[in-house]
Amino acid sequence: MPFNLDHFDPCAVPSPCYVVSEAAIRQNLEIIDGVQRRTGCRILLALKGFAMFSLFPLIRQYLFGVSASGVYEARLGREMFGKSVHACAPAYPEAEFHELLAYSDHISFNSFSQWDRFRDRALGRGVACGIRVNPERSEVKTAIYDPCGPCSRLGVTAANFRPDRLDGVTGLHFHTLCELNADSLARTLPVFEERFGAHLDRMEWVNFGGGHHISRPDYDVDLLCDLINDFRRRRPLDVYLEPGEAIALNAGALVATVQDIFRNDMDIAILDTSAAAHMPDTLEMPYRPEIAGAGKPGEHPHVYRLGGMTCLAGDVIGDYSFPEPLTVGRRLVFLDMAHYTMVKNNTFNGIRLPAIAVWEEGGGVRVARRFGYPDYLGRLS
Ligand SMILES: *Cc1c(COP(=O)(O)O)cnc(C)c1O
């Protein structure tokens, strides 16, 4: 079941607070593990999207390892997750590379110049090395999320690929999707193979990246399995996938509390959270999060513009309607707030970070972490 509100009491946690359901995470993992079992592929958790380490003991039961966007995520993966750690980033700073090597067993390089710079050190440590390629097949409609757009800085295009410099490279990596279904992979794979297939004969592994919305109810898991099985029949390689969002999709909420209500042309409610600080993707993507028990304006009689605590004029989550008038102190539950929230939040305006709680499978809610002034201070000097 997704985050099941029938049995959740938003007053049982501090406010604001991210609450993530173990049962919902497990349900996502069961679906994702089905793909591993049906195809023999290996699935990694992309820590960039969800890095709630108090749930790693659960996630580790299902997934092969983690994917890291840099040295800190690689370290978190090595120390808190264990298993396999794959790194992939646009560049690896020289000063951090020795540390990255200590934490990673696979490293994908975003250019042949990065590969040349670090090749000997990586091979000397026995790390499996890959090149991130760019198949130039755009599936993502929003430009800011499309790694295949013009002048992309993500991955080597076919025109810039260097077959003469592959000595020591054992894998190819591509990441071109975002919140997409298997039909997008079905269109991307043939283009990838057409452009880079000639080099796959000398490879041992290939990474299909993230952006596979595997745990979404309408996701075509059968098609994904067919694509991977078909690929592996033709090419005897280890196939990796590294979704982030799919692991935590619909598995968590952000609980907030109404602090003030007033009027300016319409009813406005200020919450003890912030679109800008605690759910930045609502402004960046942008999108409108669902609230339990609320609807779009017009669905219910009482309409409010919900805003956050920062000075930003645009720190507005959206306009929502409720069956009853809101009151100060009322708790609101924003849905699907586990992924790309706690990994992205910030202390703009010095507002407090939401606590992090685990809604355990046994039914209890455990507050895993509370934040305070030291967390704000620790980011400044
Ligand atoms: C963002 C990203 C992922 C994870 O993407 P999701 O949309 O969270 O599944 C995986 N790999 C790479 C290289 C990424 O940049």
Image (cartoon, rainbow, N blue to C red):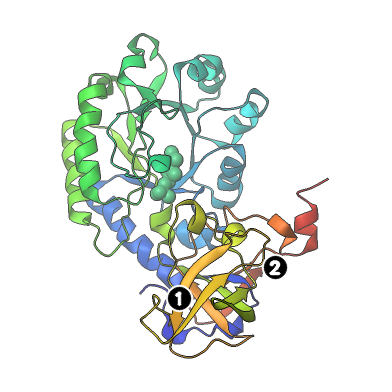
Total number of numbered labels? 2
Disc 2 from disc 1: Cα separation? 29 Å
In the depicted view, which residue is nearer to us: 68 or 158? 158
Q: Position of residue 129 (x, y in %)?
A: 45, 25
Q: Is mark 1 within 8 Å of ligand 1?
A: no
Q: Is mark 2 within 8 Å of ligand 1?
A: no
- Identify the mark at residue 296; answer none if there is no mark: none
**Can residue 286 be seen at all in this image of the molecule?**
yes
Q: Looking at the image, tell me whether mark 2 or mark 1 is earlier in sequence order.
A: 1
Residue 196, picture quadrant: top left
- Indicate the quadrant containing the C terminus: top left, top right, bottom left or bottom right: top right
In the depicted view, which residue is nearer to us: 336 or 30? 336
Residue located 24% across and 23% down the image: 195
Mark 1 nearby-residue class (10 Å; few <14, some 14–19, many ≥20): many
**Residue at the spot of label 1:** 320
Residue 316 sits above or below residue 108 on the image: below
Of helix, strand and loop, which one carries label 1? Answer: strand
**Can residue 62 be seen at all in this image of the molecule?**
no
Identify which amino acid the numbered label 2 is placed on.
Arg
Residue 314, picture quadrant: bottom right
**Residue at the spot of label 2:** 370
Q: Position of residue 141 (x, y in %)?
A: 32, 44
Residue located farthest toward the right when viewing the structure as drawn: 381
Query: Which label lies toward us, 2 or 1?
Result: 1
Marks 2/1 in contact by CB < 8 Å: the verdict is: no
Residue located farthest toward the front when viewing the structure as drawn: 265
Of helix, strand and loop, which one carries label 2? Answer: loop
Identify which amino acid the numbered label 1 is placed on.
Tyr
Q: Position of residue 59 (x, y in %)?
A: 46, 58
In the depicted view, which residue is nearer to us: 314 or 197? 314
